[in-house]
Amino acid sequence: MISFCQFGAGRIGQIHAANIAQNPKARLKTVVDVSAGAAKALAERYGASVGDPKTALADPGIDAVLIASSTDTHADLVEAAARAGKPVLCEKPLDLDRKRAQACLDVATKAGIPLMLGFNRRFDPNFATLHKQLRDGRIGRLELLAITSRDPGPPPLDYVKVSGGLFRDMMIHDFDMARWLLAEEPVAVMAAASSLVDAGIGNLGDVDTAVVTLKTASGALCQISNSRRATYGYDQRIEALGSKGMLRAGNVLESTVEFSGADGIVGEKPLHFFLERYAAAYRHELDHFIDALENRRTPMVTGVDGVRALALAEAALEGSKTGRAVTL
Protein backbone atom coordinates (compact mmCIF):
# COMPACT_ATOMS: atom_id res chain seq x y z
CA MET A 1 0.00 0.00 0.00
CA ILE A 2 1.54 3.31 -1.14
CA SER A 3 0.51 6.33 0.93
CA PHE A 4 0.21 9.57 -1.05
CA CYS A 5 0.45 13.20 -0.10
CA GLN A 6 -1.41 15.22 -2.72
CA PHE A 7 -0.83 18.90 -3.36
CA GLY A 8 -3.87 20.50 -4.95
CA ALA A 9 -7.57 19.99 -4.29
CA GLY A 10 -8.99 21.68 -7.38
CA ARG A 11 -10.60 20.17 -10.47
CA ILE A 12 -7.69 17.97 -11.54
CA GLY A 13 -6.80 17.24 -7.91
CA GLN A 14 -10.24 15.76 -7.37
CA ILE A 15 -9.69 13.39 -10.30
CA HIS A 16 -6.34 12.21 -8.92
CA ALA A 17 -7.68 11.83 -5.39
CA ALA A 18 -10.56 9.67 -6.58
CA ASN A 19 -8.17 7.47 -8.56
CA ILE A 20 -5.86 7.05 -5.58
CA ALA A 21 -8.80 6.12 -3.37
CA GLN A 22 -10.06 3.57 -5.91
CA ASN A 23 -6.68 1.94 -6.44
CA PRO A 24 -6.23 -1.14 -4.20
CA LYS A 25 -2.49 -0.50 -3.97
CA ALA A 26 -2.75 3.13 -2.81
CA ARG A 27 -4.33 5.39 -0.24
CA LEU A 28 -4.62 9.15 0.11
CA LYS A 29 -3.03 10.05 3.44
CA THR A 30 -2.60 13.84 3.30
CA VAL A 31 -4.04 16.70 1.25
CA VAL A 32 -2.34 20.09 0.99
CA ASP A 33 -3.94 23.12 -0.67
CA VAL A 34 -3.77 26.90 -0.31
CA SER A 35 -7.54 26.78 0.25
CA ALA A 36 -8.13 25.25 3.66
CA GLY A 37 -11.77 24.61 2.80
CA ALA A 38 -10.98 22.76 -0.43
CA ALA A 39 -8.30 20.67 1.29
CA LYS A 40 -10.66 19.78 4.15
CA ALA A 41 -13.51 18.79 1.83
CA LEU A 42 -11.31 16.55 -0.31
CA ALA A 43 -9.56 14.99 2.67
CA GLU A 44 -12.83 14.18 4.42
CA ARG A 45 -14.22 12.59 1.27
CA TYR A 46 -11.40 10.02 1.19
CA GLY A 47 -10.50 9.62 4.85
CA ALA A 48 -7.29 11.65 4.60
CA SER A 49 -5.91 14.43 6.78
CA VAL A 50 -5.10 18.03 5.94
CA GLY A 51 -1.46 19.04 6.18
CA ASP A 52 1.07 21.73 5.38
CA PRO A 53 3.96 21.22 2.91
CA LYS A 54 6.81 21.01 5.42
CA THR A 55 5.09 18.58 7.80
CA ALA A 56 3.69 16.40 5.01
CA LEU A 57 7.03 16.00 3.25
CA ALA A 58 8.76 15.20 6.54
CA ASP A 59 6.21 12.49 7.37
CA PRO A 60 7.89 9.04 7.15
CA GLY A 61 4.44 7.59 6.51
CA ILE A 62 4.25 9.34 3.14
CA ASP A 63 5.60 7.12 0.37
CA ALA A 64 4.93 9.32 -2.69
CA VAL A 65 3.82 12.79 -3.69
CA LEU A 66 1.26 13.75 -6.33
CA ILE A 67 1.41 17.40 -7.43
CA ALA A 68 -1.84 18.74 -8.88
CA SER A 69 -1.57 22.32 -7.66
CA SER A 70 -1.16 25.45 -9.80
CA THR A 71 1.67 25.46 -12.34
CA ASP A 72 3.66 28.15 -10.55
CA THR A 73 4.10 25.79 -7.56
CA HIS A 74 5.27 22.70 -9.45
CA ALA A 75 9.03 23.25 -9.57
CA ASP A 76 9.35 24.28 -5.93
CA LEU A 77 7.25 21.33 -4.74
CA VAL A 78 9.15 18.82 -6.89
CA GLU A 79 12.43 20.08 -5.45
CA ALA A 80 11.13 19.96 -1.89
CA ALA A 81 9.81 16.43 -2.38
CA ALA A 82 13.09 15.35 -3.99
CA ARG A 83 15.12 16.67 -1.07
CA ALA A 84 12.79 14.72 1.24
CA GLY A 85 13.44 11.57 -0.81
CA LYS A 86 9.83 11.23 -1.99
CA PRO A 87 8.95 9.92 -5.49
CA VAL A 88 6.83 12.40 -7.45
CA LEU A 89 4.03 12.28 -10.01
CA CYS A 90 3.63 15.88 -11.18
CA GLU A 91 1.04 17.38 -13.48
CA LYS A 92 2.47 19.08 -16.57
CA PRO A 93 4.42 21.30 -16.93
CA LEU A 94 7.32 21.34 -14.48
CA ASP A 95 7.42 25.09 -15.05
CA LEU A 96 6.57 27.58 -17.77
CA ASP A 97 10.25 28.55 -18.09
CA ARG A 98 12.49 25.87 -19.58
CA LYS A 99 15.58 26.89 -17.60
CA ARG A 100 13.62 26.67 -14.35
CA ALA A 101 12.20 23.31 -15.42
CA GLN A 102 15.71 22.02 -16.16
CA ALA A 103 16.98 23.25 -12.79
CA CYS A 104 14.10 21.42 -11.10
CA LEU A 105 14.91 18.26 -13.06
CA ASP A 106 18.55 18.54 -12.00
CA VAL A 107 17.55 18.60 -8.33
CA ALA A 108 15.34 15.53 -8.76
CA THR A 109 18.07 13.69 -10.67
CA LYS A 110 20.67 14.48 -8.03
CA ALA A 111 18.32 13.26 -5.29
CA GLY A 112 17.77 10.03 -7.21
CA ILE A 113 13.99 10.02 -6.87
CA PRO A 114 11.56 8.74 -9.52
CA LEU A 115 9.97 11.79 -11.20
CA MET A 116 7.04 11.14 -13.51
CA LEU A 117 5.36 13.90 -15.48
CA GLY A 118 1.62 13.85 -16.11
CA PHE A 119 1.45 13.51 -19.88
CA ASN A 120 -1.55 11.28 -19.39
CA ARG A 121 -2.41 10.87 -23.08
CA ARG A 122 0.31 8.25 -23.45
CA PHE A 123 -1.89 6.09 -21.22
CA ASP A 124 -5.07 6.46 -23.26
CA PRO A 125 -5.94 2.91 -24.38
CA ASN A 126 -6.49 3.89 -28.03
CA PHE A 127 -3.33 5.97 -28.35
CA ALA A 128 -1.32 3.30 -26.52
CA THR A 129 -2.53 0.68 -29.00
CA LEU A 130 -1.61 2.92 -31.94
CA HIS A 131 1.85 3.44 -30.44
CA LYS A 132 2.39 -0.31 -29.98
CA GLN A 133 1.40 -1.06 -33.56
CA LEU A 134 3.75 1.65 -34.79
CA ARG A 135 6.62 0.12 -32.83
CA ASP A 136 5.66 -3.34 -34.09
CA GLY A 137 6.12 -2.06 -37.66
CA ARG A 138 2.54 -2.56 -38.80
CA ILE A 139 2.67 0.43 -41.18
CA GLY A 140 6.38 0.21 -41.92
CA ARG A 141 8.39 3.40 -41.73
CA LEU A 142 6.42 6.31 -40.26
CA GLU A 143 6.41 9.18 -42.75
CA LEU A 144 3.57 11.52 -41.80
CA LEU A 145 1.89 12.03 -38.43
CA ALA A 146 -1.18 14.20 -37.86
CA ILE A 147 -2.35 15.14 -34.36
CA THR A 148 -5.62 17.00 -33.88
CA SER A 149 -6.51 18.53 -30.51
CA ARG A 150 -9.41 20.98 -30.21
CA ASP A 151 -11.23 22.11 -27.09
CA PRO A 152 -15.03 22.54 -27.07
CA GLY A 153 -14.63 26.17 -26.03
CA PRO A 154 -12.02 28.66 -24.82
CA PRO A 155 -11.03 28.78 -21.14
CA PRO A 156 -11.78 31.80 -18.93
CA LEU A 157 -9.50 34.78 -19.51
CA ASP A 158 -8.31 34.61 -15.91
CA TYR A 159 -6.95 31.16 -16.72
CA VAL A 160 -5.39 32.31 -19.99
CA LYS A 161 -3.48 35.03 -18.14
CA VAL A 162 -1.51 32.48 -16.09
CA SER A 163 -1.53 29.51 -18.48
CA GLY A 164 1.69 30.30 -20.29
CA GLY A 165 -0.12 30.46 -23.61
CA LEU A 166 -1.54 27.90 -26.01
CA PHE A 167 1.78 26.30 -26.94
CA ARG A 168 2.92 25.73 -23.32
CA ASP A 169 -0.52 24.96 -21.91
CA MET A 170 -2.51 23.10 -24.56
CA MET A 171 -0.22 21.98 -27.36
CA ILE A 172 2.48 20.75 -24.97
CA HIS A 173 0.49 17.50 -24.68
CA ASP A 174 0.67 17.12 -28.45
CA PHE A 175 4.40 17.85 -28.51
CA ASP A 176 4.89 14.98 -26.09
CA MET A 177 2.67 12.69 -28.18
CA ALA A 178 4.63 13.65 -31.30
CA ARG A 179 7.97 12.79 -29.69
CA TRP A 180 6.57 9.51 -28.36
CA LEU A 181 5.06 8.40 -31.65
CA LEU A 182 7.85 9.63 -33.93
CA ALA A 183 10.46 7.91 -31.74
CA GLU A 184 13.00 10.54 -32.75
CA GLU A 185 13.53 14.15 -31.79
CA PRO A 186 12.28 16.91 -34.11
CA VAL A 187 15.08 19.06 -35.52
CA ALA A 188 12.94 21.86 -37.00
CA VAL A 189 9.69 23.56 -36.00
CA MET A 190 7.41 25.69 -38.20
CA ALA A 191 4.36 27.39 -36.71
CA ALA A 192 1.46 29.65 -37.63
CA ALA A 193 -1.05 30.96 -35.11
CA SER A 194 -3.98 33.35 -34.83
CA SER A 195 -6.58 34.61 -32.41
CA LEU A 196 -9.87 33.73 -34.10
CA VAL A 197 -12.07 32.37 -31.32
CA ASP A 198 -11.97 34.97 -28.54
CA ALA A 199 -10.74 38.53 -29.02
CA GLY A 200 -9.96 38.67 -25.30
CA ILE A 201 -7.34 35.95 -25.75
CA GLY A 202 -5.68 37.99 -28.49
CA ASN A 203 -5.77 41.11 -26.30
CA LEU A 204 -3.79 39.18 -23.69
CA GLY A 205 -1.10 38.44 -26.28
CA ASP A 206 -2.05 34.78 -26.68
CA VAL A 207 -3.50 32.78 -29.58
CA ASP A 208 -6.37 30.31 -29.74
CA THR A 209 -5.77 28.65 -33.11
CA ALA A 210 -2.48 27.17 -34.28
CA VAL A 211 -0.87 24.76 -36.71
CA VAL A 212 2.66 23.46 -36.12
CA THR A 213 4.81 21.26 -38.33
CA LEU A 214 7.70 19.26 -36.89
CA LYS A 215 10.45 17.70 -39.00
CA THR A 216 12.85 15.01 -37.84
CA ALA A 217 16.36 14.23 -39.04
CA SER A 218 15.05 11.26 -41.03
CA GLY A 219 12.58 13.52 -42.82
CA ALA A 220 9.42 12.31 -41.07
CA LEU A 221 6.84 15.07 -40.63
CA CYS A 222 4.25 15.75 -37.94
CA GLN A 223 1.49 18.31 -38.19
CA ILE A 224 -0.33 19.41 -35.02
CA SER A 225 -3.64 21.28 -35.21
CA ASN A 226 -5.00 23.09 -32.14
CA SER A 227 -8.11 25.18 -31.65
CA ARG A 228 -9.79 26.49 -28.51
CA ARG A 229 -13.21 25.94 -30.14
CA ALA A 230 -14.84 22.86 -31.61
CA THR A 231 -18.61 23.28 -31.41
CA TYR A 232 -19.16 19.53 -31.75
CA GLY A 233 -17.15 18.52 -28.65
CA TYR A 234 -13.62 17.62 -27.55
CA ASP A 235 -11.79 16.65 -30.74
CA GLN A 236 -8.87 14.27 -30.15
CA ARG A 237 -7.57 12.31 -33.14
CA ILE A 238 -4.29 10.86 -34.38
CA GLU A 239 -3.43 9.62 -37.86
CA ALA A 240 -0.14 7.95 -38.77
CA LEU A 241 0.81 7.28 -42.40
CA GLY A 242 3.61 4.86 -43.16
CA SER A 243 5.23 3.01 -46.02
CA LYS A 244 2.86 0.04 -45.58
CA GLY A 245 -0.37 1.72 -44.59
CA MET A 246 -2.08 3.99 -42.09
CA LEU A 247 -3.12 3.84 -38.44
CA ARG A 248 -5.86 6.05 -37.06
CA ALA A 249 -7.22 6.64 -33.55
CA GLY A 250 -10.52 8.48 -33.73
CA ASN A 251 -12.66 10.34 -31.23
CA VAL A 252 -14.37 8.62 -28.33
CA LEU A 253 -18.09 9.27 -28.76
CA GLU A 254 -20.87 9.80 -26.24
CA SER A 255 -22.54 6.73 -27.71
CA THR A 256 -22.06 4.38 -30.64
CA VAL A 257 -25.75 4.67 -31.58
CA GLU A 258 -26.42 6.07 -35.06
CA PHE A 259 -29.64 7.05 -36.79
CA SER A 260 -29.93 6.28 -40.48
CA GLY A 261 -32.69 7.84 -42.58
CA ALA A 262 -33.50 9.20 -45.99
CA ASP A 263 -31.56 12.41 -45.33
CA GLY A 264 -28.38 10.71 -44.12
CA ILE A 265 -26.75 9.15 -41.09
CA VAL A 266 -26.51 10.97 -37.76
CA GLY A 267 -24.17 9.90 -34.95
CA GLU A 268 -23.24 11.14 -31.50
CA LYS A 269 -20.73 13.85 -30.66
CA PRO A 270 -17.31 13.26 -29.09
CA LEU A 271 -17.14 13.28 -25.30
CA HIS A 272 -17.41 16.83 -24.00
CA PHE A 273 -13.98 17.55 -22.47
CA PHE A 274 -10.74 16.11 -21.14
CA LEU A 275 -12.10 14.91 -17.79
CA GLU A 276 -14.49 12.56 -19.58
CA ARG A 277 -12.30 11.76 -22.59
CA TYR A 278 -9.19 10.87 -20.60
CA ALA A 279 -10.76 9.36 -17.48
CA ALA A 280 -9.22 5.96 -18.25
CA ALA A 281 -5.88 7.54 -19.12
CA TYR A 282 -5.66 9.18 -15.69
CA ARG A 283 -6.34 5.84 -14.01
CA HIS A 284 -3.76 4.01 -16.11
CA GLU A 285 -1.24 6.79 -15.48
CA LEU A 286 -1.53 6.25 -11.72
CA ASP A 287 -1.34 2.47 -12.17
CA HIS A 288 1.90 2.90 -14.12
CA PHE A 289 3.42 5.18 -11.50
CA ILE A 290 2.62 2.72 -8.71
CA ASP A 291 3.95 -0.18 -10.77
CA ALA A 292 7.18 1.72 -11.44
CA LEU A 293 7.64 2.34 -7.72
CA GLU A 294 6.87 -1.26 -6.76
CA ASN A 295 9.26 -2.70 -9.35
CA ARG A 296 11.90 0.02 -9.06
CA ARG A 297 11.60 0.91 -12.73
CA THR A 298 11.93 4.30 -14.38
CA PRO A 299 8.47 5.69 -15.30
CA MET A 300 7.63 5.90 -18.98
CA VAL A 301 7.29 9.70 -18.83
CA THR A 302 10.00 11.55 -16.92
CA GLY A 303 11.07 15.10 -16.24
CA VAL A 304 13.31 14.87 -19.30
CA ASP A 305 10.20 14.47 -21.46
CA GLY A 306 8.72 17.53 -19.78
CA VAL A 307 11.75 19.68 -20.56
CA ARG A 308 11.93 18.51 -24.17
CA ALA A 309 8.23 19.16 -24.78
CA LEU A 310 8.70 22.62 -23.30
CA ALA A 311 11.59 23.24 -25.70
CA LEU A 312 9.27 22.45 -28.62
CA ALA A 313 6.63 24.79 -27.20
CA GLU A 314 9.15 27.62 -26.98
CA ALA A 315 10.33 26.96 -30.54
CA ALA A 316 6.73 26.97 -31.82
CA LEU A 317 6.03 30.26 -30.04
CA GLU A 318 9.13 31.81 -31.60
CA GLY A 319 8.26 30.48 -35.04
CA SER A 320 4.69 31.78 -34.83
CA LYS A 321 5.99 35.26 -34.12
CA THR A 322 8.80 35.35 -36.69
CA GLY A 323 7.24 33.30 -39.46
CA ARG A 324 10.50 31.38 -39.79
CA ALA A 325 11.42 27.76 -39.18
CA VAL A 326 13.21 27.27 -35.86
CA THR A 327 16.10 24.81 -35.85
CA LEU A 328 16.63 22.73 -32.73
Image (tube, helix red, strand yellow):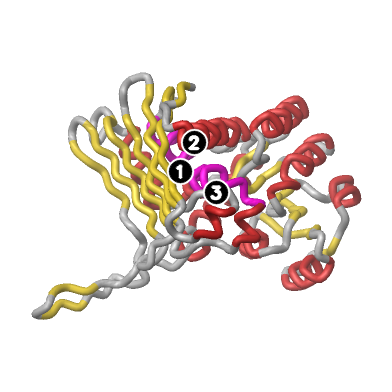
Residue that badge 2 annotates: 321
Q: Is residue 71 visible?
A: yes
Q: Report the front residue among 48 and 237.
A: 237
Range of magenta residues: 162-182
Give the label on residue 174, or none.
1
Mark 1 surroundings: few (<14), some (14-19) or many (≥20) residues within 10 A: many
Mark 2 surroundings: few (<14), some (14-19) or many (≥20) residues within 10 A: few
Which amino acid does the dot numbered 2 rest on?
A: Lys
Question: Above or below — where is 143 with respect to 147?
Answer: above
Residue that badge 3 annotates: 206
Q: Residue at x 51, y 31 (%)?
A: 315
> Marks 1 and 2: CB-CB under 8 Å?
no
In the rendered view, does 120 fall on the left or right side of 259?
right
Ranked by sequence position, the earlier of labels 1 and 2 is: 1
Outermost residue on the left side: it is: 262
Q: Residue at x 46, y 37 (%)?
A: 320
Between circles 1 and 2, the one closer to the viewer is 2
Ranked by sequence position, the earlier of labels 2 and 3 is: 3
